[in-house]
């Protein structure tokens, strides 16, 4: 049987464990897997683009488990009553190819994206960071805020979104959770005085939601909205201000902020920092950029973490997904009742 965790059980899991606890623990799981980067068989995601959005498959495996995530990105969905992003994922045993775990990943991706951002920031942002600017208050924003508090102790937020209803939603969801929130009228105002700037906008456009003039020495920029060709968030001049860190360069050069720079533009894959092969932040006044597009290792980690955390509980259910005939060579006999002999 294949274990399954659906949406309602994921909601119950978050309710039982707490989103901050989950993301703090997941950040450690993701870091552990980044540290063994070389043990994974990696490829960039496979995307199918249409005028409406993109549908992607994100595969990866190590010597024990294979994982993939199905995920869409449809920026015009909210206006039609649908979410921008939905997803589900699978873990399979590489020894026999059988899927062993299936889970919803709309919520799980929100948790893993924020956990990844915070995990990277604890290595690249200044350790005395106290204020984070949130440019974009959509579905990911609250998760980012909670993850940064859980991992880095950030409680002061400056938020801006062109959609005032999204900003109001963000304030409504977090104001009672102990955050000091300042609502700003522009992205520049939000960035003023921030130690960390997180950009997470949805429009599929070559945009500059954060300008070069908004960036000051010592700032860490966590840009997570640019996740497909033709979609960026930063003034290109920002990329020249300090080192740029990425997950998997072949994918980020297609989808990230660096998609419009020369192919030889230097970037550092973040795993190299963890492995001691490349420097992270080297000075208090340095500007660091995490050009994050989301990578399959993070989904692998999230699925692995969820599977381990819910094993043996009422949150995981066996589903009849794989045919299992007594004779593995007789699938027909398994499926079709024998014809009586007259």
Image (tube, helix red, strand yellow):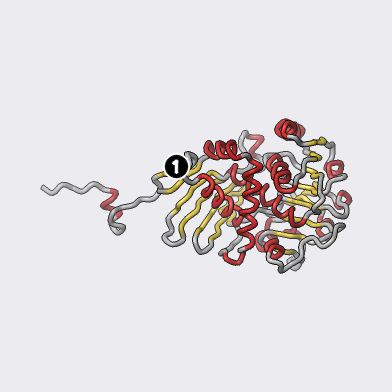
Q: Secondary structure at mark 1?
A: strand
| Above or below, 144 relative to 264 | above
Where residue 238 sits, quadrant-wise, is bottom right
- The residue that appears at 48% across and 41% down in the rendered structure is 313
Where residue 328 sits, quadrant-wise, is bottom left
The one of 112 and 81 positioned closer to us in this rendering: 112
- The residue that appears at 85% across and 57% down in the rendered structure is 284
The one of 112 and 167 positioned closer to us in this rendering: 112
* Image coords of residue 242 (percent x, y): 82, 60
* Image coords of residue 74 (percent x, y): 63, 44
| Above or below, 220 relative to 7 | below
- The residue that appears at 42% across and 55% down in the rendered structure is 98
Can residue 52 be seen at all in this image of the molecule?
A: no
Could you tell me how many numbered marks the image carries?
Answer: 1
Where residue 184 sits, quadrant-wise, is top right
Can residue 58 be seen at all in this image of the molecule?
A: yes
How crowded pointer 1 is (Cα within 10 Å; few <14, some 14-19, many 20+) is rated as some
* Image coords of residue 185 (percent x, y): 84, 36
| Above or below, 240 relative to 24 | below
| Residue underneath mark 1 | 317
Q: Is residue 209 left or right of residue 251?
A: right
* Image coords of residue 259 (percent x, y): 72, 59
View extreme (left): residue:
342
Q: Is residue 150 left or right of residue 181?
A: left
């Amino acid at each position: 049987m294949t274990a399954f965790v659906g949406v309602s059980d994921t909601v119950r899991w978050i309710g039982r464990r707490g989103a901050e606890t989950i993301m703090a623990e997941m950040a450690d799981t993701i870091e552990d897997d980044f540290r063994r980067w070389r043990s994974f068989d990696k490829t960039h995601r496979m995307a199918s683009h249409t005028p409406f959005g993109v549908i992607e498959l994100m595969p990866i495996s190590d010597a024990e488990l294979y994982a993939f995530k199905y995920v869409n990105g449809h920026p015009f969905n909210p206006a039609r009553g649908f979410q921008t992003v939905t997803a589900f994922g699978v873990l399979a045993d590489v020894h026999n190819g059988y899927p062993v775990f299936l889970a919803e990943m709309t919520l799980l991706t929100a948790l893993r994206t924020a956990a990844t951002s915070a995990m990277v920031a604890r290595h690249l942002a200044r350790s005395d960071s106290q204020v984070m600017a949130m440019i974009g208050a959509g579905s990911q924003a609250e998760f980012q805020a909670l993850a940064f508090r859980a991992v880095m102790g950030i409680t002061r937020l400056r938020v801006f979104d062109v959609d005032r209803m999204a900003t109001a939603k963000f304030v409504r969801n977090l104001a009672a959770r102990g955050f000091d929130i300042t609502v700003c009228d522009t992205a520049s105002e939000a960035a003023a005085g921030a130690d960390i700037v997180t950009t997470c906008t949805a429009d599929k456009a070559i945009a500059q939601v954060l300008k070069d003039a908004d960036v000051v020495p010592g700032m860490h920029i966590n840009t997570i909205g640019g996740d497909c060709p033709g979609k960026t968030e930063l003034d290109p001049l920002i990329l020249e201000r300090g080192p740029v860190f990425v997950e998997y360069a072949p994918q980020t050069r297609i989808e990230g902020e660096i998609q419009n720079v020369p192919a030889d533009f230097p970037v550092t894959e973040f795993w190299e920092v963890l492995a001691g092969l490349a420097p992270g932040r080297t000075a208090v006044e340095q500007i660091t950029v995490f050009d994050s597009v989301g990578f399959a290792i993070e989904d692998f980690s999230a699925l692995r973490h969820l599977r381990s955390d819910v094993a043996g509980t009422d949150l995981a259910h066996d589903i009849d997904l794989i045919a299992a005939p007594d004779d593995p060579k007789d699938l027909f006999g398994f499926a079709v009742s024998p014809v009586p002999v007259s």
